[in-house]
Amino acid sequence: MSGLIVPAGQGRKLITKAQEVTFKVTAADGAATSCFEVVVPPGFDVGAHTHHRSQELFYILEGELDLLAFEPVKRTEDSWHDWESAEGDRVVRAGAGSCMFVPPGCPHAFRNSTDKPARMLFQSYPSPDHERYFEEIVEIFSAGQSVDPEAVQELRDRYDVSQITPLRYEPSGR
């Protein structure tokens, strides 16, 4: 039996204007958990969302991200940035070495509100759900000048993503 070594800079890359995702470990490698390296550009906000089955782990390698991983007292549909939990938890600005674990059902989000890209290691269970999600979202983003919101919603429905606040990408300089 052999393991897998993926050197720095290696792995299958999927690139859109909003994210760069490098597949590091996948179901094809025999993994129960998918592992990706993700570059999050300035201005990217994944939007608050939940998963009923999936659990996720985010580990910041470089840069800073605003992180959310709690149920707020009140969910708002436009933005998660000011949410607060009944226990007083608030959004955290996290830097390199910070980690966020998200169990099924927990609202969570991340955004890069800085002017520099951030890089994170992202693990998702079970594989290959997020692998397929990333593959299909790249196709939707590449299909034309504008993104088809119905196609994105159908994709989210198929892959256990219940969006609460919108995904946004507002690069600096706009």
Image (tube, rainbow, N blue to C red):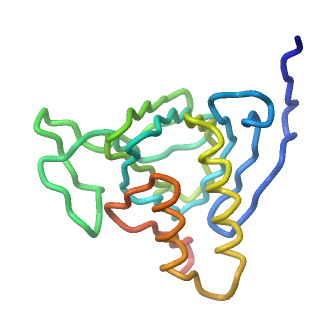
Nearest the eye: 170 or 145: 145
Q: Is 150 rendered above or below residue 50?
A: below
Which residue appears farthest toward the bottom when viewing the image?
145
Examine the image and state in which quarter residue 82 appears: bottom left
User: Can you name the residue that lies furthest to the top here?
Assistant: 1
* Residue 51 x, y percent position in the rendering: 40, 46
Q: Percent from the top left, x then y, of residue 4?
A: 85, 23
Compared with 42, 26 (above or below) is: above
What residue do we see at 62% from left, 31% from top?
A: 33
- Give the quadrant of the N terminus: top right
| 144 sits to left or right of 49 | right
Instruction: Please state the horizontal and vertical placement of residue 165, each as a whole percent of the image.
Output: 33, 64
Q: Which residue is drawn at 49% across and 29% down?
A: 98
Exactly how many numbered labels are in the figure? 0
Q: Is residue 118 above or below residue 172?
A: above
Q: Where is residue 62 in the image (x, y as percent from the top left)?
A: 62, 39
Observer-nearest residue: 103 or 9? 103
In front: 173, or 153? 153
| Residue depicted at 56% across the width and 37% down the height | 124
Residue 24 higher or lower than 38, as above or below:
above
Q: Which residue appears at 39% of the width and 68% of the height?
A: 166
